[in-house]
Structure formats: C-alpha cells, structure tokens
Image (cartoon, coloured by chain):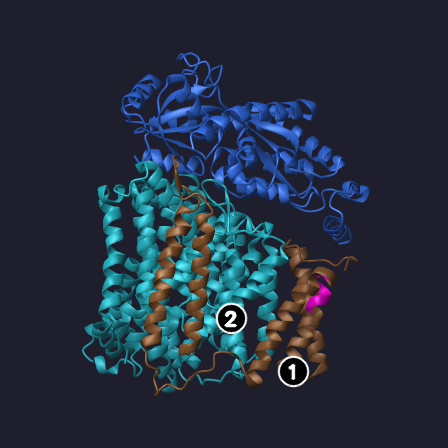
Amino acid sequence: MLIRRRTLLAASAAATVASPAIAQNYPRRAVQLVVAFPPGGSTDVGARILAAMAEKDFGQPITVVNKAGAGGQIGFTEIARARPDGYTLGFLNLPGMNTITLDPERKAAFTIDSFIPIVNQVLDPGFIWAKGDSPYKTLADLVDAAKKNPGKISACTTGILSDDHLAILMVQEAAKCEFRIVHFDGGAQQLTGVLGGHVDVAFDNVGSVFKRVGTGEILGLAVTDTQRSKFLPQIPTTPELGMPSVISNSTRGVGAPKGTPADICKIVETAFLKAINSAEMKEKMDAVGLALKPMVGAEYAKYYADLQAQAKKYTEWALKMR
Amino acid sequence: MDALGHLLSGFAAALSLHYLLYAFAGCILGTLIGVLPGLGPAAGTAILIPLTFSLDPTGAIIMLSAIYYGAMYGGTITSVLINVPGEAASVVTCIDGHQMARQGRAGSALGIAAIGSFVGGTLATVALVVVAMPLATLALKFGPAEFFALMVAGLCLVVGLAGKNILAALLMTVIGLLLSLIGLDPVRGAPRFTFGVEELFDGIGFVPVVMGLFGVAELLLAAETRQTHMIQAELKSWMPTRQECKDCIGAILRGTGVGFVLGLIPGVGAIVPTFMAYVLEKRVSKTPERFGKGAIEGVASAETANNAYANAAMVPLLALGIPSSPTIAVLMGAFIINGIQPGPFLFAEQPKLVWTVIASFFVGNVLLLILNLPLVGLWAKLLKIPFSYMCAGVLIFCVIGAYGLKQSLFDVWVMLGFGIIGYLLRKLDFPIAPAILALILGPMMEKSLRTTLEISGGSFAIFLDRPVALVLLAIPVIVIGFLLFKPRSLAPLRESDVD
Amino acid sequence: MRQGRLIATGAMLVFCLFAIWQSLLLSLTDRLGPGPGFFPFWLALIGAVLAVALLITTFREAADPSVAETRILPHGDGGKRWLAIVVLLAAVTVAMEFVGFRIAMLAFNAVLVIALGERRWWVIAVFAILGSFGVYYVFTTWLDVLLPVSWFGF
C-alpha cells in the first residue's frame, strides 16, 4: 500500500525525479507492455511470448495492451505519454516509429528522444506475398504487371510509413513501376484483404504469415533481406532477384518513456534479456517464425540512432508522393 | 477437428470449476443489473468491465458473456412485477407480462419467460455452432467495401426504429459518428478535433460515454421523480401450468426463429426481434384479442426472441468482428481490452478460446434457468433498496469504471458531461441508441471507406461493382426513404398491433 | 418541449458547422487518396443538412395543445436532487485528485444519501465507509484496478 502510494505520488508530482525507494521495490505490481499493433500481428505475438517468459523472473505480471491504429502512432503516443514509473513499457517498432516523427502532417506528440530503448527482441525481414492462386508467381511477374498497368496492381502495407510501405517505395524505385498502395492496420487485416481477393499483394514480414506459405494458402514472392530467412529457405531474397537496394526489415524491442529511472530500466533489461536469450524463447519464436536479435545498451542505442538517419531518406520519398 | 469435436473440448474447458464459477458469478451479476431499473445490459456490462481486469482472457469473456445474458434476462423480472423494463428488450414483455402479474399469474409469466429464454438461448447456440464456421469462411468475401456498406445498413436499421422521429435519429447518428472521429486519424495519424488536449488523442473513451449516457442520465431522470421504494407485487403462482406450457410451444419455437435470424444481421438490436416475434405471434394466434390482456404466448414469444437474439448476435461478433448492438459493442470492447480481436481469423487462430466461450454459452443458459426460477423472490427484494443508496452505489461504480480504464480523471469528466447530455436528450425525445452505435462503428466505418477508396484509386464506382455492397447500401436508402416520406401509412399499423 | 428541441437541434447544427470548418483545415483528398478531413467533412455536411431539416419540421409542427408542455430543465424538489447528483459528482472528481478516492468518496456517499433524504446517521456512516474504504480495498487489492491516491498518500 505504502509503495503504491509513493509511486503514484512520485509520478504525479515530479515525473522525472528518480526515487531510490521506487527502484528498490520495483516492480510492485503488474506492468503494462503497450503494443502499437492489433492482437494477432507479429509484434503482438512476439510481445506476448516475451511477456509470458519475462514475468517469471520479473516477479509481477506483464500485461500486453494493444493500442493499434495509424501505423502504430496511437500506441507510440500512449507509451511516450505514460508515467515514467516503469509500470508502462512499450514495444518500439523500427523504422515505423522513426518515420512517424519525420512526417509533419502527423503532428506526432513524440520524438525519437521520447523513448529509452532498453532491449531489442526481434529482427523480422520484410516478405512480399500473394494469394496462393495468384497470377503473379514471382516477383518479376508482379513487377511486369505493375509496369504494364501503372497504379492498377494493389499492394497493401501494415500502416502508412511502416517498413512495409517503405519496401513498396523501394521496389517502385528499383523496378521503376507503380503500385496502388492500400494501408491496413496490421497483419490480420492484410490476410483478410489478400485472401479475400480485395488486394493483389501484401508487403509484410516473415513472422506474420510464414506458416501459411506451407499450406499453399499464400504464395511467397521475395524476402527483402540480404540472406534467406531460416523460416522460408525456399523463398529468394530481393538481392538474388536483382534488386539489391530493396532491403527492408522491422526490429522490435522494449522501451520505456523518457524519464524512467535508469535503475528501473536496468531491472527491465536484465529480466527481459534473460528471457530473450533463453532456449525456451528461441524454441517458441522459431515456432512463430520470428528471428531473435538481442541488442542492449550502447549497441541498441546506436542502432536506434542510425536508423533515424536512414529513415529520413525514405520518408522524404514517401512525402514527395503526396 | 470438426465443429463438434471443438465444441466437446470446449465443454471440457467450460465445465472446469473456475470457469463455471465465473459464469455463475456473471449470471448473478448480470441478472442483478437486469433487475435494477434503469441499468440496461449495455451500461451494466460496461460498469462491470473492471471486474474482469484481473481474469485470464477466456475467464473474462466467459464472465462478461454471462453478465450479458443475465442482464438480457433480468429485465424480465421488473417488467413483469412492476411494469418497468430494465432495458429496451423487455419493453414488449411488459405488455402481457404485467397484465399477468396483476391477475396474480406473475409466477406463470416469470416461469414461461425463464423456460422460453432457456430454449431460445440453447437452440440459438446450437444454430451458432452450425452456422458460425461457414459464416467465418464467408466473412473473407467481406472486403472493406462490404464492411462499409454493412455498417451503413446497420446504422440505418437502427435509425429506422425511431418511427416518426427519423430525422432526429439520423442526426444523432451523424453526431455519434463525428464524436467517434475525435483523436488520431486511423490512416494517417493526423490529430483531429483534439485542440491540443492530450487526453483526446486516443479518442473519447466509449466506456465513460456509455456510463454517462445510460447510467448517470438514468439516475438523473429518476432523481427528478420521487422514487423511494418499489411496489411489492404478490406472487401467487410459481410455475406455469402444463396447459400454459403447451400453449407456448409454438410461440417459443417461432420466437427462436425470429430472434436468431435477426440476431445474425448486425445493427438490428434486441428490441426489433422481440417486437417482431410478438407481432408474429399475435398474427398467428386464433384469439388475437387476448394479446395485451395477459396472453402467456405474448410473454413467451418476446422473451424467447430476446434470448435467441442475444445468442445469435454473437455470430457476427465472433465471425466478423462486428458488434450488432450497443451491448455487444461493449462486449467487443471488453474482448479487445482482454487481448482478443474478434474477426474472421479468430476461429482459426484461437479455436480453443472460441469454442470454450461458445460451450460456456450453453452452460450459461442452464445456469440462468437454475438461478432464475428459485431466486425470483430474492431479486424482487432488491428493488426495496432505497433510491438514495442505489443512486450512490451506481455512481461509485460509474466513477471507478470511467477512471479505471485509463487512470484518467478526464474520463470521469467525460462521463459526467455525457450524463447531463444524455438526460437532456432523453427529456427532448432524441433517440440515444443510434448515437451509441455510431460511436462504436464510426472509426471502423471511416477506415473501411478509406481503404475501399484506396483500393479503387479514389473511385466510388467500386460500390457498383460489388453486388453485396450494393444491396447492403440499397437497403438503408429504401428503408429511410420509405420512413421519411410515408410515415403515416406505417404508424397506425404499429399501434394497432401493440394495443 | 418544442422550444427545447429547437435549441438542441440548433446546438447540433452549430456543432456540425464547427466540424465542417475543422475538417477543412485538414487535407480532404490528395494523391495518396482520401485524407483525414474527407470523412468528417462529408459527415458534418450531411449532419448540417439534417439539422436544418429537423429545425424546419420542428418549427412547422404546431404546438400540440393536448400534450402539456413537459419541463425540460429540472425544477422543484426533484431539481434539487438532480442538482445534488451533478454537483457532487463534479466535486468528487475534483476532490479525488487532491484527497484521493477514499476520502473523496466517503464525503460523496455521506452527502449524497443525506441530500437524497436519508437521516439515520449510523446507516449513513456504515454505507459511506463501505462505499469508499471498502470499495477501494476490493478494487485495488483483489481486482488490481488503480484508484486515485492523494498527495499525502491517502
């Protein structure tokens, strides 16, 4: 009772002042892990696995809360605005988060500095796929069709200025073609859209759909990475298909709102990193097709900062289209 | 595994002790909400959402579904005993049910309502098991264009209920839709109508709005007219006689059919099936003049349709992710809060949860029957709680519910504001239901329209190419047009049927 | 009633016009398709047309002499109870931020039931304590729902 009172007191009074009393007793209650994408998408799946495993060491429940919409902006805003008391953590999806801060129309209520990157979990390569009985059997088929009918072949993303949107822009630039871009809210909507025949092709990530490639439900066209995915060894990469400039992936890690005391971040990092490095995690993530890429501290911070510069270029392309 | 196999394993899970307890607690709480006047299932379910925060998703959904059924059911008791419908769905029950109570046949009325609800609910759940899977597959054909058309049709069907108040209902729909757009644009992320207020970035919370419009507004209305204690109705008979049951078999079966079919169509709401089942029963009856003077078939048909509807309305929610009524919308919010996105892939991706929940629907219907028959007297006693304590108690719950979701006092202010607005709208006879439904459907509607236009490259002609969407869009145009320009020819028909 | 409806419809018309103006500040349509202002603009336009139509029909309706004009705003004894609920609810919302849920609700419960006619002090006391400290205990301890706590930790 005493501690809860203090946490709230500290949070409402002076948000950024770190009180040692807080960290010593952290965590005293359930921690919310905000996911900026809807349930069932690959960010959500990864987050739920991580939450379930990390809470064993953590000693308190870690609750995944989905705040989907606007390519993640609603959820990221939620994380940035949360009390920096360690009881709200969130998944940072890069480069989606970067591009939001770079688009002036979105009047993002956060900047890249509104978050403290704590620990990265996943690097999920981009994946281009179509319906199982699609007329486009290869990436070349698709690109040819898009060249013949500029702006007629519809390609869907998991949100505006998401990594998938950037991947479409990269393919358009590399192949000099034009797609009709449709923005969905996440992987589940993409599935409904493409399998229902409403959209021709999805730009997605390996994790969302890799299981469905095996069932013939969907047809994999390309993985946008420098090397083949271990989950889809039969699918060629974009460099193999003559588009070396099309490299797009999504990384997902855990962060906290700016102002969260460093000792709390360290507690989170320790618990989460232990979970990420465990054999059980690898087994579970393999089952859902998500490649682990643990990064912490300086490495993650550098990656986080570097990506901002890179994302700036893509975003400017996208904005030019408007 | 086929549907039956899934269902059996669902039963195994649903019958485990803790889920049984959640369902039981939900039934009791729900019936309580239904019994308390002025707290319909929508407000009741919203108020009780905080209770489920600490349960696992399956348990939370089971409990909330049980609350929902209980609430749909509990309204019957007050309708029969004191002619106060706890919620819209029980309005029709009042017509004959209260007449029966006056004749000392309250037990018969309550008994047949319980039996009818049980049969209607169970048969509708059987149909749900059979239809849900095919519907879930069919749902893939529902693209953004069809979703948009479906939502327009749903909203307009609700508007169509407003009778002569049709313009006001349309206006309320638009206001509800506009309010739902506050917050970040779901496609581009640009803030809209937020005026820099951070709390508005996430949109106006649905729960505080519903608690205001239903809970607080209802209390404000009640506070104006002196309400101290409820009248004690004497219960002479506890059970319907064998002859009465026999008379009702047809009514119960027809009520199930009407309730189930209408429950599949999103946006119909609970009052339409009960009303239509009642009208149908009166038409079929050889002695239609008894209706309105204590005809047990009238009670049976309305109550059966009510519960059949409540179960069937789960089909569009589970299979399409579409809430068909304000209560289901609250329930859907609770699903999402608990990490479950209802939609076409729910059956494929979380079969265990879905089938456990469906199995718990059966269990819930049985529990309700067991609860309702012997506990009628106890429920009635609750009405003797003095109004002052009832009022304070409901307000405590409302404050907690509004605050607890986001730990935001802003939401408590939203609740109070909408309480006053709801009071004024009720006084001025502006229908609130369309605005509530619009508030829920608004973001989905905008998103599906904009996605549709992205797919078509900005051309509205896409709606002409899609027959299902076209038909769905044509329905509301015809219905609204008919109601707007021919209200006179409809009105006498309705009145004569109810009288 | 008629006057009240006219005022309410007028307010909704103003709301819709305001929404039209606000939507025009956003992009309606651009190369990427319909923009953020698209849906609200058309909705608000439809709403404004509906509001005008409703204003006209309400205005034309002759006041029905058979129906007594119902008072819209609360009045008399009922009005006092009405006002008590609204004012107390506003007060408790303000108070919770400073004195926390328990103290604020304790006072709210006591004053509300007194305002609504209860006079037995011990019933009031038991109810007020159960409805504040009791509810707080149940929700924070058993249900893990956070409720406001005061600056002084109470």
Q: Which residue is mark 2?
A: B217
Residue for point 30% across, 34% down = A197
- Picture coordinates of residue B423 (x, y %)? 49, 72
- Picture coordinates of residue B364 (x, y %)? 44, 59
Which chain is brown in the rendering?
Answer: C
Snapshot quadrant of residue B286:
bottom left
Say which element carries label 1.
Answer: loop
Residue B393 counted in the magenta span: no
Start and end of the magenta stretch?
Answer: C100-105
Q: Which residue is mark 1?
A: C118
- Picture coordinates of residue B184 (x, y %)? 51, 46
Q: Amino acid at mark 2?
A: Ala
Which chain is blue in the rendering?
Answer: A
Residue for point 68% across, 69% down = C130
User: Which tint is chain B?
Assistant: cyan
Q: Nearer the viewer, residue A280 or B52?
A: B52
User: What secondary structure do most residues of the magenta stretch adopt?
Assistant: helix
Q: Quadrant of the C terminus of chain B?
A: bottom left
Q: Nearer the viewer, residue A163 or C111?
A: A163
Which chain does the residue under circle 1 lie in?
Answer: C
**Numbered circles on residues, count:** 2
Q: Is residue B333 above or below residue B398?
A: above
Which chain does the residue under circle 2 lie in?
Answer: B
